[in-house]
Amino acid sequence: MGRYQSQPTQRRPWLSWTIIALPLAMLTLLSSREFIGDQLNLVPEPPSAEAERLAQATTMTPRAQRLFYRHRPDFASRETFLDKCNVPKDAIVLGCYLEKSQGDRILSGKIIIQDIRDPQFSGTMEVTAAHEMLHAAYARLSPQQQEALFQQLKIAKLRVTDEKLLQVLDEYKGQEEKRYRHELHSHLGTELKDLGNPELEAHYQQYFSDRQRVIAFAEQSVRVFNDFEQRAEALAAEIEQFEQQLTASQAELEAEEARLSRVSADLEQRKAALENTRTAAESALTQGNGQAERLINQFEQGKIDFNRQVDDYNAQVQANVQRIDRFNQSVQDYQQKIDAYNQIAQNSRKALESLKGATPAANESPVEPDLAPQ
């Protein structure tokens, strides 16, 4: 009996659920017991209270609830989840889909969802449950149904405007097509608000009575990271503006410092000339020279002009000191902006780390790493 495991699903740059790594032929085959149960609408084993809560919250239809419950959803702590789902290092995986098979026959399936109670990740478990249930639903479609659905999903994908979702889907497109089809079905069903196709909406209505509720959970689940990103972008713009202002202010201060240095040098020359005039006046006065009165008047007038220029210079120096103080305050404000930006980055990293996996043990077969950009 073989045991197969899903791989991490790409989802936005921040979060991921699961991706089915099993050959699609295996996914589409059901054990006789499960197939009969689906057809006869037999009620599976009683679900847990948490499974019921998620099914109700995501407006799963009775058909979807039976499918969800039949896969015995398990809500595991982070450590248990990482172990059961064999999550690789740095992968952000929130749920996984496991199946046991014998040859081409699927004997049982199981959904494991990371039990996340942190309020900042509100909505994550809900959309993960919906996403995983859609994997199971897609596996139960016939090849003809899957092909017809894929043609509609390809057109619906053209309506995606979210760059992060587009990036995830495009990266899947470059991988195995069966895997791409599976993820296209789950991602668009839980994240694309307007499918633009009544027939496609009708398909998902088999599983959700109000698909927009699921979309809202998907948006809510990444809100903390979107908030981080928006705040970081706003601060980055402010920091850039600060840098431009500080660069310009620094250039102005340096130019003013150079000008004041020239004024100071000129005043020193005037002071030296004035000292010479005073010395000449004193000498003429001592000698009874007729030039004494003229030199004294020249000195007194020069002193008045010099003192006025010194007062003006000192006022300019004081004004420049105030500009320097304002500049230094701006530098402090700039540093605070940088500190705030770095704090957001740190908080974002901590939030991501709380969802990341650990390095698989040496005897484990690592699943394919998450390709979502970090």
Image (tube, rainbow, N blue to C red):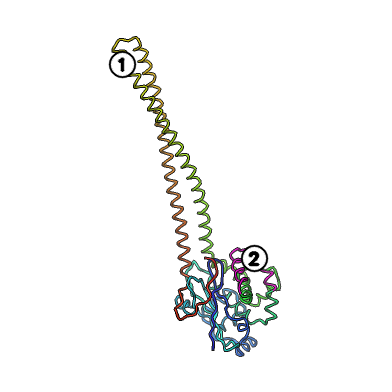
Please provide percent x and percent y for residue 148. Answer: 70, 76
Number of on-image labels: 2
Residue pointed to by mark 2: 160
Does the magenta stretch mainly form a helix, a strand or a loop? helix
**Visible in this render: residue 14?**
yes
Residue at x-position 52% and y-position 61%:
227
Q: Quadrant of residue 146?
A: bottom right
From what the image shows, is residue 333 above or below residue 300?
below
Residue 83 on the magenta span: no
Image check: 247 left or right of 205?
left
* Kind of residue sitting beneath label 2: Val
Tell which of 82 and 211 is nearer to you.
Answer: 82
Please provide percent x and percent y for residue 193. Answer: 63, 67
Q: Which residue lies most toward the left here?
A: 286
Please provide percent x and percent y for residue 113. Answer: 51, 76
Q: Secondary structure at mark 2?
A: loop
Residue 162 on the magenta span: yes
* Kind of residue sitting beneath label 1: Glu
Q: Secondary structure at mark 1?
A: helix
Residue pointed to by mark 1: 282
From what the image shows, is residue 344 above or below residue 248?
below
- Closest to the camera, between mark 1 and mark 2, is 1
Magenta-tinted stretch: 151-175
Image check: 162 left or right of 320?
right
**Visible in this render: residue 110?**
no
Residue at x-position 61% and y-position 63%:
162
Image check: 33 left or right of 361?
right
Image check: 201 left or right of 249?
right
Residue 10, numbered circle: none
Mark positioned earlier in the residue sequence (1 or 2): 2
Q: Quadrant of the N terminus?
A: bottom right
Q: CA distance from mark 1 to mark 2?
A: 93 Å
